[in-house]
Image (cartoon, helix red, strand yellow):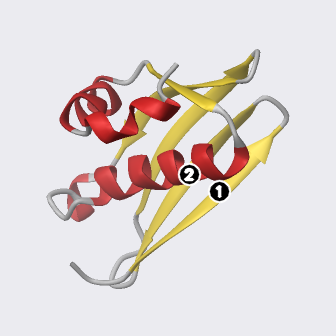
Amino acid sequence: MVGVTITRHETGATGEYHAHIADSDHIGRLTWSERNGVRYAEHTLVPPPIGGRGVAMRLVEAMVADARENDFRIAPVCSYVEVAFRRHPEWSDVRA
């Protein structure tokens, strides 16, 4: 995969992780909202031109790393995030 840079954007109790791909103007997104110390991973959106490159997984990995570093839990609402958590039982420490 070409270079991927993940950035975090927060506005109060909501936010997004953005995946910026080196060879594209398209941006992948993972949106979330927070309630009572739990971030609900609501949607993972990867435009077709950058699909199939592992972008969605990189977004989830960034959220998991962020949860460990900043002491919050993740509740998968998005079906992709739910599947990712099932495939990675080592992430159970941050699952709400």
Is 71 on the left or on the right of 3, as rendered? right
* Residue placed under numbered mark 2 in the picture: 17
Residues at discs 2 and 1 in contact (Cβ within 8 Å): yes
Residue ID at (47%, 26%): 95
Residue occupying the far right of the picture? 12
Mark 1 — residue? 8
Q: Position of residue 20 (x, y in %)?
A: 46, 70
Residue 91: image quadrant is top left
- Front one among 90 and 77: 90
Give me the residue at 65% from left, 56% from top: 8
Query: Which image quarter holds the N terminus?
Result: bottom left
* Image: 74 above or below 18: above
Query: What kind of residue is marked 1?
Result: Arg
Percent coordinates x, y for residue 9 in the rendering: 70, 52
Say above or below: 70 vs 1: above
Quarter of the rendering containing residue 26: bottom left
Around disc 2, counting alpha carbons within 10 Å, would you say few (fewer than 14), some (14 to 19), or many (20 or more)? many
Q: Residue 31, image x and y in percent?
A: 54, 37
Residue visible at 32% across and 40% down in the picture: 90
Q: Nearer the viewer, residue 2 or 69?
A: 69
Q: CA separation, marks 2 and 1?
A: 5 Å
The image's mark for residue 33 is: none
Q: Is residue 51 left or right of 56 when viewed as pictured?
A: left
Left or right: where does residue 30 sit relative to residue 2?
right
At label 2, which amino acid type do we have?
A: Tyr
Give the mark, 2 or 1, whose residue is nearer the N terminus: 1
Density class for disc 1 (Cα within 10 Å; few <14, some 14-19, many ≥20) is some
Q: State how many labels appear.
A: 2
